């Protein structure tokens, strides 16, 4: 069975629709597991979870090829998983294990995997945006047909680098899609206190960039908007901006008491959970059997649980090798 989004000519078949569900669920279970492990004192450092924002990661990355580029933020686990990052290697990195993406040295906020186009997560607010612009420039110069995507939050929108990047991308008609995950908060600061104009799509008009605002809790709508933007980029029509209105269920970091948020707001967000909503769509619109979805649930739960167990048993990162890959003579 297929369905057509009213705002797009793209057809979404049952297989694609089911894959979106799998991606969202994998992200959710990775994040909840990471949160539990952190609370138990098993993960070092800080972690920033994207629970509630799964539809944005799944929808945008569902429009990309493996070879396309992507940059993300300090809250980037979901984007990395959606782009094809390995759950085990990510979990090992969070644990600080040698089997992690950076031998357990980078932690949660610096995941990178060139094999699937993940140019890197970034702890600096807005720091990944110019990296994505660079990726799109390389793609344009090489004539590779690749597209670059940069995820950032509304907290980065007032940063100068956002405007510099939008201007340069428009000036050179670069194949890039800017994706603002507008969850209403810059760390602990509500958008009303840090953005004079909370309509992020309005920024694009100044640079002549195509922009659209979508419901970030509707993975189908995000996929449709992303496919349109990616198609324009591949056709040489330049950059686009997608503002996905979404919800951040947890605090800025794990352990954040969230005293700055009304309790009613938290309840309203969980009522808009994108995963059960899409599960209902799969059954009612795409004819997917509920038993099949239960089997998917069990399989992905086992995948994430196994990854956590295997990662915990890995050899910890060795401090004695800290300068390895820093100096050429120690990289051999």
Image: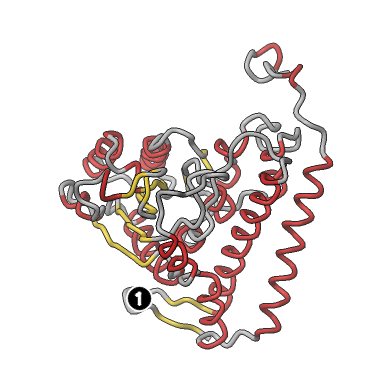
Q: Nearer the viewer, residue 50 or 102?
A: 50
- Check the image and tell me how it is coloured: secondary structure
Q: Position of residue 130 (x, y in %)?
A: 37, 35
Q: Position of residue 211 (x, y in %)?
A: 26, 58
Q: Quadrant of residue 112?
A: top right
Residue under the image location 29 percent in, 38 percent down: 165
Q: Position of residue 127 (x, y in %)?
A: 41, 34
Q: Nearer the viewer, residue 226 or 199?
A: 199
The residue positioned farthest toward the left in the image shown: 206
Q: Nearer the viewer, residue 232 or 207?
A: 207
Residue under the image location 66 percent in, 29 percent down: 105
Residue under the image location 45 percent in, 71 percent down: 272
Q: Is residue 115 above or below residue 7?
A: above
Circle 1 crowding by C-alpha within 10 Å: few under 14, some 14–19, many from 20: few
Q: Position of residue 191 (x, y in %)?
A: 30, 50
Residue under the image location 73 percent in, 18 percent down: 332
Q: Is residue 46 above or below residue 219?
A: above
Q: Nearer the viewer, residue 215 or 42?
A: 42
SS type, badge 1: loop
Q: Quadrant of residue 227?
A: bottom left
- Residue indicated by mark 1: 9
Would residue 12 be found to the left or right of residue 21 on screen? left
Mark count: 1
Would residue 96 be found to the left or right of residue 250 on screen? right
């Amino acid at each position: 069975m297929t369905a057509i989004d009213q705002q797009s000519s793209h057809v979404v078949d049952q297989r694609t629709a089911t894959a979106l569900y799998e991606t969202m669920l994998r992200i959710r279970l990775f994040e909840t597991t990471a949160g539990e492990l952190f609370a138990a004192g098993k993960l070092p450092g800080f972690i920033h979870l994207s629970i509630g924002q799964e539809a944005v990661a799944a929808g945008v990355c569902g429009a990309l090829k493996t070879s396309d580029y992507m940059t993300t933020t300090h809250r980037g686990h979901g984007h990395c998983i959606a782009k094809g990052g390995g759950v085990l290697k990510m979990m090992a990195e969070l644990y600080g294990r040698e089997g992690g993406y950076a031998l357990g040295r980078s932690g949660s906020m610096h995941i990178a995997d060139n094999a699937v186009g993940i140019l890197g997560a970034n702890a600096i607010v807005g720091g990944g945006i110019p990296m994505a612009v660079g990726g799109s420039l390389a793609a344009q110069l090489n004539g590779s047909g690749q597209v670059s995507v940069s995820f950032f939050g509304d907290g980065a929108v007032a940063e100068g680098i956002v405007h510099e990047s939008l201007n340069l991308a428009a000036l050179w008609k670069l194949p890039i899609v800017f994706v603002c995950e507008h969850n209403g908060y810059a760390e602990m600061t509500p958008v009303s206190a840090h953005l004079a104009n909370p309509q992020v799509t309005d920024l694009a008009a100044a640079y002549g960039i195509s922009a659209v605002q979508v419901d970030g809790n509707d993975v189908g709508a995000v996929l449709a908007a992303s496919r349109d933007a990616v198609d324009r980029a591949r056709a040489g029509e330049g950059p686009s901006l997608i503002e996905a209105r979404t919800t951040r269920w947890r605090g800025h970091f794990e352990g954040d008491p969230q005293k700055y948020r009304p309790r009613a707001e938290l309840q309203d967000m969980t009522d808009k959970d994108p995963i059960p909503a899409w599960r209902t769509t799969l059954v009612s619109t795409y004819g997917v059997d509920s038993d099949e979805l239960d089997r998917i649930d069990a399989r992905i739960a086992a995948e994430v649980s196994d990854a956590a167990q295997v990662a915990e048993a890995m050899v910890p990162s060795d401090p004695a090798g800290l300068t390895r890959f820093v100096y050429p003579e120690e990289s051999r």
